[in-house]
Image: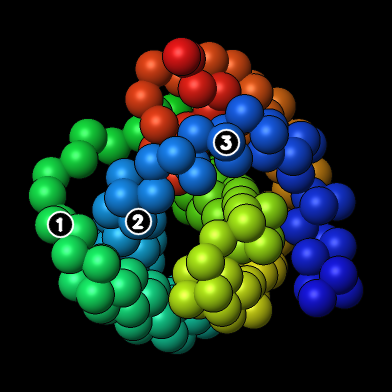
Amino acid sequence: MQQLLAPIYEFLACETPDEWVEVALENQEIMLIDHCNCEKKAANTAISLIFRYTERRELLMKMSKLAREELRHFEQVLQIMKKRNIEYYNLSASRYAAKLFKRARKDEPGALVDKLIVGGFIEARSCERFAKIAPLLDDELHKFYMSLLKSESRHFSDYLKLAADYSEQDISPRIEFFSEIEAGLITSEDKEFRFHSGLPSR
C-alpha cells in the first residue's frame, strides 16, 4: 500500500490537515453525499473530455474507462447511503475543483494539458484523503475507501501521462503552478465542509 501511495505523497505539496479529518468524522453523512457528487463529477469530466477532444485516441480510451469506473464508484456510494438511510439531496459544490480549473489556460494545447494536470491533482487528493480517513471509519467504509485507492491512483497516473504526452514542453512548471494553488485551497479556511474542502471554519 505504501508503494501505491508514495507517488501521491510526493506529488502533493501538503497533507490533509488533521482538522479536516476531525470535521469529516463528525459529518459522515455530508462526506458521503459529497463523495457521491465527486464520483459523478469525475465521470462527467472524463465524458466532457471525450466530447471535446475526439481526435485524441489514447485520451478517448483512457477517459472512457475512467468514466465507467467513476460511475461504478458513484453507484457503490449510493448503495452505502441507502443502507444507512442517508438521503441523496442537493449539496452545494466545494470551491476546490472550480478554482483549479479556472486557472487553466484557454489556448490549445495548453488548455487540454492544464485540464489533465488538474484532473491529476483531484485524483491524487482523493486518494490521499481516502488513505488518511479510512483507518478511522467503521469496517464497511474502511474497506470501501481502501478498495478505491488502486483505481484512484491509476487515474492520477493516467491524467499526468496524458498531460505529458500532449504537451509541447515539460509540464513540471505547470504542475508546480497548480501545486501551489491546490495546497492553498487545502490549507486555507473554508466556510463549508466538503470532501475536498480546506480548513474548516468552526
Classify 10 Å Cα crowding around label 2: few (below 14), some (14-19), many (20 and above).
many
Quadrant occupied by the N terminus: bottom right
Classify 10 Å Cα crowding around label 1: few (below 14), some (14-19), many (20 and above).
some
Residue 121 at x, y percent in the picture: 61, 49
Which mark, residue 22? 3
User: Which residue is painted at 39% across and 17% down in the image?
Assistant: 191
Q: What residue type is labelled 2?
A: Leu
Residue 91 vs 47, above or below: the answer is: above
Q: Name the residue under label 1.
A: 88
Q: Toward the viewer: 156 or 108?
A: 156
Give the mark toward the camera: 2 or 3. Answer: 3
Number of numbered labels in the structure image: 3
Say if residue 93 shows up in the picture: yes
Q: What residue type is labelled 1?
A: Tyr
Which mark, residue 32? 2
Q: Toward the viewer: 83 or 62?
A: 83
Q: Toward the viewer: 194 or 45?
A: 194
Residue 155 at x, y percent in the picture: 57, 70
Quadrant in the rendering for residue 137: bottom right
User: Which residue is painted at 35% across and 56% down in the image?
Assistant: 32
Sequence-wise, the earlier of marks 2 and 3 is 3
Sequence-wise, the earlier of marks 1 and 3 is 3
Q: Which amino acid does label 3 sit on?
A: Glu
